[in-house]
Amino acid sequence: MSHPAEVIDAAADTVVEQDDLWVRLRAVEERVRRAVAVRRAADPDPDDPYRGQYLAPDAVDRLLDGPAQDPAGRTPWQPVAGSVLGTLAARFDLSDLDLDLLLVALAPDLDARFERLYGYLNDDLTRRRPTVGLALELCGLTRATSARFRLAPGAPLIAGGLLEVTEPERPPLSRVLVVPDRVTGHLLGSTRPDPRLAGLLGEVRADPTAEDADVRRAALAAATGLVQLRSRGGDAEGLAVAALDAVGRRPLVLDAAALARRPADVPDLARVAAFEARLTGAGVVLGPLDALPGQPAERARVLGALCTALRGIPLFTHGTLGWDPAWAADTPVVLTVPAPSPARQAARWRHALDLAAGDGSPVGDADQLARAVAAHRLDAGQLRRAADVAVRTARLADRPVHPDDLRTAVRAQNGAGLDRLARRIEPGVGWDDLVLPPTTHRRLRELALRARHREQVLGQWGMRPGGGRGRGVIALFAGESGTGKTMSAEVVAADLGMDLYVVDLSTVVDKYVGETEKNLERIFTEASAVNAVLLFDEADAIFGKRSEVKSAHDRHANIESAYLLQRMESFDGIAVLTTNLRANLDEAFTRRLDVVADFPVPDAGHRLALWERCLGDRLPRAADLDLAFCADHFELAGGSIRACAVTAAYLAAETGEPLTMRQLVTAVAQEYRKLGRLVLEGEFGPYLADAHGA
């Protein structure tokens, strides 16, 4: 016979080294030879012509003397380096007898000759797998009845899932032994997981910037049992994978969101995942826990099934939630994963961009790119996907990655959950579009600065300790309608590379008790998972002052305000409240604000700049257009000036001529009437007739 030293794994199409599997299988063949000899010696009529309906003696000889066949069609009896059986025995606490029984059952899956030989020994060619009795006989244990318990339900082979005893309706010794396909594949070198886990497994890479001390601590914690990695903006999954790598275990990453979609199957899937982890020597990474079913009882059922099945296997769970003891019988070691420092974040982006580029093409200044999206909080998957999109976008333009490429790619990682609760605005304005007093402008810059560096100041430096405080940034924009509050929020969002979400209060406030709080909680929860600026326009409608309780209505209104006070303080995002009258807000809200910006009605100088900005440089202007007169005489806020400019532009478009002063005055007069203001000679002067004709 030939003796190949390698077996080609047909499933993975890779060459893998095998251990003494084939040597031990040769020993099984020798035992089969002896068993056949015993059968033939005890047969009173081996030349019985009816014996051919089973297997003729000369056919048996041909099978025994013929070449052994492996799955690749070659003879596999040459041993090579490694010990897959030894590793399997250690992982499942198998004895040498267990390995022999496993090999007897495995033989027909590796060499087709054994099917017919087992049929001969079973005296029934339709039964081509070993029975319990035949397996014990081939292991020399026909009289050792105690050995039968190695195939009992609680025995390592059976309880571990390496071997199945089928046909339970038959007597115990006549039941058939079957090795699951996944076990056979593993012994032949396949790394493909059990197909029942399809759609549940994720791919996570180790965090390349994880601190060695953090990796060692996580690895040591995993050796003691369950570990909960509570993310505070850091890469919890990446740390878990790095810890498993450090102890020589591959990661088996379970997607909690996918499990949540199949709650009825969780107990079975948990057992399959546990078997896969034990078979391959993997550790399990499960999360995010936030994605599991929201109902406490259902979440406890899912986590309890998973933790019970995975007991004894390194298990990392992760998410932003704290651990509830009711979730599982085991209590985890809880480790906090803080947000990375600016230097580490830049290193993460550099690694992700280089990985996405692949061929070594330039990706730009990683430090500059990281600063452009410093306000964003991304998990490892989002960061990797954003880097990939940014690199592909830049490659289309044949240039290095630009900060705008990365901002756009990062915004694309936002889920659509908040779109159902708020109106999304993709910013289209910048700082140059604002016409505001210097003090207000500085407050807006401060808001952007706080949002960009909050992880470093509030997280790493711990400047907001205790009290359940979040790492959010809350600002108040106070001023009359039309003074630029919403536009300023859009500018700040654009500077941070984020979208602006405007909360529609009509979808929030509910007349039924407790519903308003539920609606707000949904908004805050979704906003925490999205890199965006959240705008509560006319916020005094829900952030108003608490009052003396004189009725049930007052009591419930105060409960809403108390809830909001607590929820705003624990918020981790960026929120802007706007109000026309600052005095309407409760003082307790004011104390929790990080930035307060006042938006006064513009003076004449600012109004002139607003007229110039709103009319733009593409609208043709007639020679009689006097914007200085408009700025001096018409006391309008920026929003009203913009409305006048648009109305005047429509009038000019109708005539097909450049914009005239008469058309502009007509637009102003219409705006006055819309606002309920009188058209007076003192304001319109020589253009009063045009105003009255509007």
Image: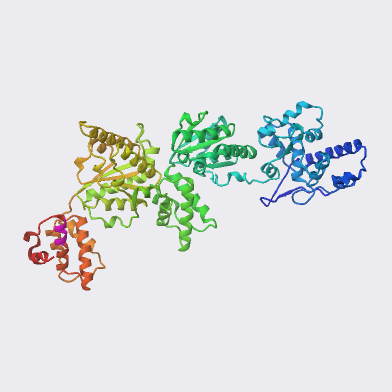
Q: Count all numbered tags in the image, as a single digit.
A: 0
Residue 363 in view here: no
Q: Residue at x 31, y 50 (%)?
A: 492
Q: Position of residue 521 (x, y in %)?
A: 35, 40
Decide which of 534, 434 is in the foreground and name it: 534
Decide which of 67, 177 is in the foreground and name it: 177
Q: Horizontal placement of 132 versus 508: left or right? A: right
As drawn, the residue found furthest toward the left would be 681
Quarter holding residue 675 = bottom left
Q: Position of residue 300 (x, y in %)?
A: 48, 33
| Relative vertical location of residue 342 with respect to residue 618 in this rendering, above or below | above
What is the magenta range?
A: 668-674
As drawn, the residue found furthest toward the bottom would be 656
Q: Is residue 671 magenta?
A: yes
Q: Position of residue 16 (x, y in %)?
A: 70, 47
Quarter holding residue 284 = top right
Q: How is the image coloured?
A: rainbow
Q: Horizontal placement of 380 versus 143: left or right? A: left
Q: Position of residue 442 (x, y in %)?
A: 26, 48
| Relative vertical location of residue 359 with respect to residue 65 in this rendering, above or below | below
| Relative vertical location of residue 256 with respect to residue 669 in this rendering, above or below | above
Most common SS among magenta residues: helix
Q: Residue at x 76, y 28 (%)?
A: 147
Q: Horizontal placement of 217 versus 626: left or right? A: right
Residue 426 in view here: yes
Q: Horizontal placement of 678 versus 466: left or right? A: left
Q: Residue at x 16, y 59 (%)?
A: 671
Q: Quadrant of the C terminus?
A: bottom left
Q: Is residue 536 magenta?
A: no
